[in-house]
Image (spheres, rainbow, N blue to C red):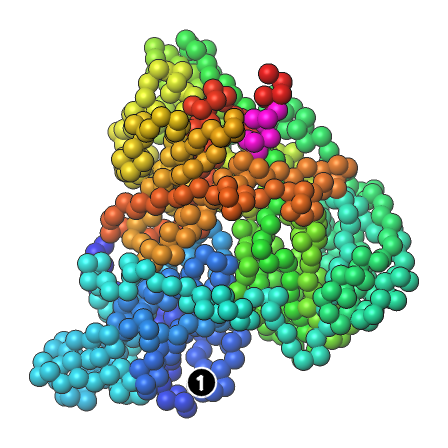
Amino acid sequence: MSTSDKFTFSRRSFLKTSALASGGMLIGFNLFNACKEEAKMPIDLSQLNYNDFNAFIKISPEGKVTIFAPNPEIGQGVKTSMPMLIAEELDVLWEDVYVVQAGLDTENYKNQIAGGSQSLRQNWEPLRQTGATAKQMLVNAAAARWDVEASTCTAKQGVITNANGETLGYGDVVLEAAQLEVPEEVTLKEPQNFTIIGQETANVDIDKIITGKPLFGLDYKEEGMVYASVLRPPAFGQVLDTYDATAALTIPGVIDVITIGEKTRKYFEGERTSWTAKLSQSDKVVVIAKSTWDAIKGKNALKATWKQDSEVENSELHDEKLMGILDGNKFRTRRKDGDIKKAFAEADKILDRTYESPFLPHNTMEPMNFFASVTPEKVRLVGPVQTPEEAAKVVSGLLGRDLEDISVELTRMGGGFGRRLYGDFVYEVAEIADVIKKPVKMVSSREDDMSTGVYRPAIKYRIAASIKDGKVTGYHLKEAAINGNMYGLIPNFFPAAAIENYQVDTANYKSNITTGAWRAPYTNFLASAEQSFFDELAEELGVDRVKLHMDLLEKAKSNPDPKIEYSPERLQGVLKLVVEKSNYGNTIAEVYQGLAVYYCHNTHVAEVADIVMTNGVPVVKKVTCAVDCGIVVNPLGAKNQIKGGVIDGIGHTMYGELTFNNGEPQSNNFNSYQLIRMGQTPKVDVHFVKNDIAPTGLGEPTLPPVGAAVANAIYKATGQRLTKQPYMNNLQAEKVVG
């Protein structure tokens, strides 16, 4: 459907108020196109409460536009890019737009979530329709004042012009526009007419970020607030036995020591399979103090003993367990095309490799924290969380309060990467506030975050391909993951439909170690394994790597399959672009290149890593990245997301690893857990495939393939095929063994 097609826009998806005490037009828009019928608009702007709405536009008599952004901002840039969609179709100057963060509204809206790189993809048309409808209402109001047909008027940069050249600003007619009916149809701009979309636009919070203005959960303060630090079990599968708070209570600034856990444990009773339930098996000791530092010192002074939960087996020896699963036959088949057994039985040769990845923590820059105030009238929650609606629902159940009593105000987040999808820190502070009857903020230390949280699961993949007469005839992928990992869509990613005999099987090993979403869930290591395998497969076949991929994608194009998620044409497009821009295969001496091409989170990506050997150590000097994400809304923000994903992926591919001993994490801070350093970050060149396709996400898709691009480059430099992450540890190990 062309962007210039007309859209029917009902009152349920576009709401307006007819009388505004402060003078202005307040236009509500449903961010996720899921507005409930009973949604009501506030009348008096001076009485607006962020908990009473989801997201709105305000146009003032001065022509200024305020957009209330409801979804959580975790650094992915949606607080900037999504308002750009509205401002584009509203046709105002971006410098006249002011964006503020709204709070949770479970009454009128749903799906306020940050995750999955879905925000722009889901809201490309709804938000533009919102802006276009607002503009049409303003034009209609101006036409009525001039007594002319609205079709003879135009609007641009906040100014309406009639056929006689007369002009009115948006602010001049905003009160009249508020009295008009919502148009039944609106027309959206063609991409060639965009003036805001496609322009490099600075983050709307950038000035506050670089000048240290309060934006984040750690910044939040209010009168009478106290601070809390929580002592949790040091190992998974343990519960509190005894504790002694004598020393903690002598520390200046410490107010009290309490225990929590019973409410949360009862709420999750019977849900032993969920990771939140596992974090909630034990009582926890909480130090209440006048400052964060006082609370942490008090927690460090506590003396506690712990015991193994008799009802839960503490799972260890993960490597051996996962390998045993791969060698077994208890798998769930996710997709099966053709006959794998026959293809392998008739093969001239079989390539079979096993790939391994460790647990990884999230390591957000801002540790977990949240504020709560519990009174007989209301429960106020303030802080950084990716799933505010879920948090409100759980707190309602924990405290036995009506959901209408719970409000959630959102702060900007200093990183999420999936960790803040899980609201255990919200549940803790709510229970603390309920006990002490004071407003309180719980603040975790870096050590708390790394040792008592949730992790990317350790995973092993076994990939095998059958070769007959120089052709790939079969492909079999097996996954063994701690607590499970893969889901239904991934079996329909490449090479599905490209290989006649194709099968994907999964199995998991249940562990007490809590695992969950980590940046680019499900694909963050799978891409590394698969694309490393295809590099070796091309070598085994004696064919050019690019040609192998192009030929397989041609097969997928000739074998249309409605189940596949990727576009063979778009994957070919990014592959061609990255080969051109990286000069792949024609680089200067002493530079070794590795290639990977991948689809995930609705976006197609190809990457080439350039490495050099320095004192016998591989150093990633540059990554060339070709991306097809459709229309690029904000190139500046898009490039930042792409570069961040690439660098994050390299860091964890090369260095990241968290190990456990009897359920206890062996690293709890950056002195023992290596993140990528500034001097290790490569140059990242970004190139976009230009098209007029609706945009897709960028927060996650560039991370998964970079591991394979680096591994394939290292192979060319050293002759070593790397199958186990982190690569630097295993490169060194192989050298020692050799």
The answer to whether residue 338 is visible is: no
Q: Is residue 525 left or right of residue 237?
A: left
Query: Hey, which residue is sitting farthest front in the picture?
Result: 615
Which residue lies under the disc numbered 1? 45
Residue 119 falls in image quadrant: bottom left
Instruction: From the top left corner, tell me how far across and down residue 314 is, in percent.
Output: 76, 38
Residue at the image position 19 percent from the left and 86 percent from the top: 144
Instruction: From the top left corner, tell me how far across and down residue 71 is, in percent.
Output: 47, 64
Q: Is residue 425 left or right of residue 421?
A: right
Query: Hey, which residue is sitting farthest bottom in the picture?
Result: 21
The answer to whether residue 49 is visible is: yes
Residue at the image position 65 percent from the left and 77 percent from the top: 222
Magenta span has 729? yes
Q: Quadrant of the N terminus?
A: bottom left
User: Relative to the observer, which residue lies in front, 355 or 44?
Assistant: 355
Mark 1 neighbour class, 10 Å CA radius: few under 14, some 14 to 19, many 20 or more: some
Task: Check disc 1 and give the amino acid type.
Answer: Leu
Q: Which region shows up in magenta?
A: 725-733
